[in-house]
Amino acid sequence: MEITIKTLAAELGLSIATVSRALQDSHEVADKTKKRVLEMAKKLNYHPNPYASSLRKQKSKTIAVIIPEIANNFFSFALKGIQKVVEKEAYNFLVYLTEEDIAKEIAITKQLQSGRVDGIIIALSSQTDSVRHLWDLHNMKIPIVFFDRVCDEIEASKVYTNNFESAMNATDHLIENGCKRIGYFQLSNKLSLAERRISGYRAALEKYQIGFDEELILTCGTNVEENHQRIKKLISEKAIDGIFASVETLTITSYDVCKDLGLSIPGDMKIVSFSNLATAHLLSPPLTTINQPAFDMGMEAASLLFRNLTRYNPHPLVKKSEFKSVLIARESSALTQE
Amino acid sequence: MEITIKTLAAELGLSIATVSRALQDSHEVADKTKKRVLEMAKKLNYHPNPYASSLRKQKSKTIAVIIPEIANNFFSFALKGIQKVVEKEAYNFLVYLTEEDIAKEIAITKQLQSGRVDGIIIALSSQTDSVRHLWDLHNMKIPIVFFDRVCDEIEASKVYTNNFESAMNATDHLIENGCKRIGYFQLSNKLSLAERRISGYRAALEKYQIGFDEELILTCGTNVEENHQRIKKLISEKAIDGIFASVETLTITSYDVCKDLGLSIPGDMKIVSFSNLATAHLLSPPLTTINQPAFDMGMEAASLLFRNLTRYNPHPLVKKSEFKSVLIARESSALTQE
């Protein structure tokens, strides 16, 4: 005989609705009742439905974390936050690196369709302009949490920072300290995060009635030498006096280029960067950063994922969790004498 | 009928020894003969022995990389090297972090005994003072390559740098530039790597007839604030004029402590560090580093592992691969006026 919710309800003398709510851990049901329902479910070897049952049998006690890059302090601190939660839950996590390559991201997600992991935390690669591979996972009901570089189309929990506001504040800060032509350097023009940051940058320019010049937006790649040449060219040809970098690797290159060109920071060039560099305060000059709370964001992403892993839930939690980044002003963007 | 090497030899009209060598890809056998043997082995569905056969069936096409820490440029560059080889072989790799905790290392290796991966690359945690958990894996014939923080006891392929020589050169460099009391800061006193580095440090002191003072060796932990206090105490109480750090995190803390104490680098304190920090040349002052060829070491470790993964081999390759680190002298250790 197949054990259904109806069987449980009959055995317990409760309504089907109550049993269903108890199994979903609803706050509308008393703890005592929940306990009775769970005990009976266990006794009768009740499985909520075939799919959930097969899921439970397959539990790998492992989650996947897919990130573009590991030599980046933001992602490495985030991993520590994820690790903290994962350990508490007695789970394991596996790190997959896409190296900013959508082909690798697709290959990894294909592989995860086999059920190797119970859930996935992903930060998209800078080249990810289509998320069909993620729809496949989503449609298989493998829980996903999007992290930092989120995807707008898929309805799932997301953890990110106030990108519009942070970019606006950073640009505002540079203008207040005297910049008139600010270059914005990024790794991607495909992510929604990129759009939001550029919107924030533009909003600050508008506030000060500075025209937006598309040619001051530089979208770099992963080749450091190429980035160096392109940044050098832009600085030389466009006479920019400020740099707003969306990622620390482009900031390191910007420092190098300024050295090459004999430009003093902050005298000739002011720099602000999204960065969690451990050495930011020790650089020459110390770097003004927009710090993202990477560790806390990692913990939140893992916590949201576990909300949808640890028990059968026909209505998975979908939460959008926005964290605030903090601008830490240091010498690289300081006001200087004309 | 069971297909053995004898069957193959009879079918092919070759000696058993030749067939055996051909299956081991020996250079003593002509390629043409090897090809014939392999084709026949395939045709007859030959399995070298039951264990190898079960191994082959289980192939996960995945290797594990166990490292202590990810917010460390040495390990993140090494991972890129590993990734390069792994992709070429159409394998995947999973990253496990021990966070310098032997308990986590043991838990991870226990889990890997299930055959989840085909092989393992591991850098020991700084707290690993017993390798029983690794003997278990080794005895199960799961191929292991030790990386950087190697273990002396177990006979397996190892990839590491010339730690004795590097430490001696770094100490020599500090003495040549005027240091008389050099502190050595490390994360572990349990690894063989630590022993070698300290021996190198001592050898340089002896060369200049400087007495060895055990109290100048500081073994730190993973708590940054505690490390800060301990380094501050040592600098204050022991009047050291040089720091040789075995890991970049302790160097960052040393810079901070010098700032706190109003000590100028390199005037009052000279610093050299094992480090692959991308910002070393941009620090104030630029940091003298001992660079380990992390990327190449990662590629070598993965290549050695695949030598023992990709075909049945009763005599797995055991190779010790020593790489040379390079001292890059920058301002943090420069000769200054008295």
Image (spheres, coloured by chain):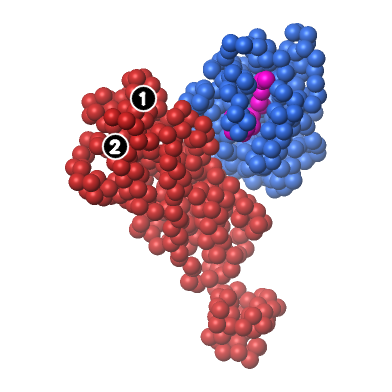
Chain colours: A blue, B red
In what element is the residue under mark 1?
loop
- Residue at left 34%, top 28%? B267
Residue B68 spot, x, y in % from top left? 46, 41
Q: Is residue A102 above or below residue A336?
A: below
In which quadrant is the C terminus of chain B drawn?
Answer: top left
Q: Chain of mark 1?
A: B
Are the residues under marks 2 and 1 on the same chain?
A: yes
Which mark, residue B264? 1
**Magenta includes A253?**
yes
Identified at 40% across, 24% down, the residue is B256
Label 2 close to label 1 by CB (< 8 Å): no
Q: Looking at the picture, how far across and down is residue B75, in whole percent? A: 50, 43
* Position above or below: B60 against B334: below
Q: Nearer the viewer, residue A33 or B104?
A: B104
Q: Nearer the viewer, residue B223 or A212?
A: A212
Give me the residue at 55% from left, 32% from top. Answer: A73
Residue A69, percent from left and from top: 62, 38
Q: Which residue is mark 2?
A: B178
Whether residue B83 is visible here, answered yes or no, is: yes
Disc 2 and disc 1: Cα gap in Å? 15 Å
Q: Which residues are magenta?
A: A241-257
> Between residues A144 and A128, which one lies in front from this camera angle?
A128
User: Closer to the camera, A70 or B199?
Assistant: B199
Tell me where residue B16 sits by quadrant.
Answer: bottom right
In the rendered structure, does residue B201 fall within the stretch colored magenta?
Answer: no
Binning the other alpha carbons within 10 Å of mark 2 as few (below 14), some (14 to 19) or many (20 upward) gives: some
Q: Amino acid at mark 2?
A: Gly
The residue type indicated by label 1 comes to Ser
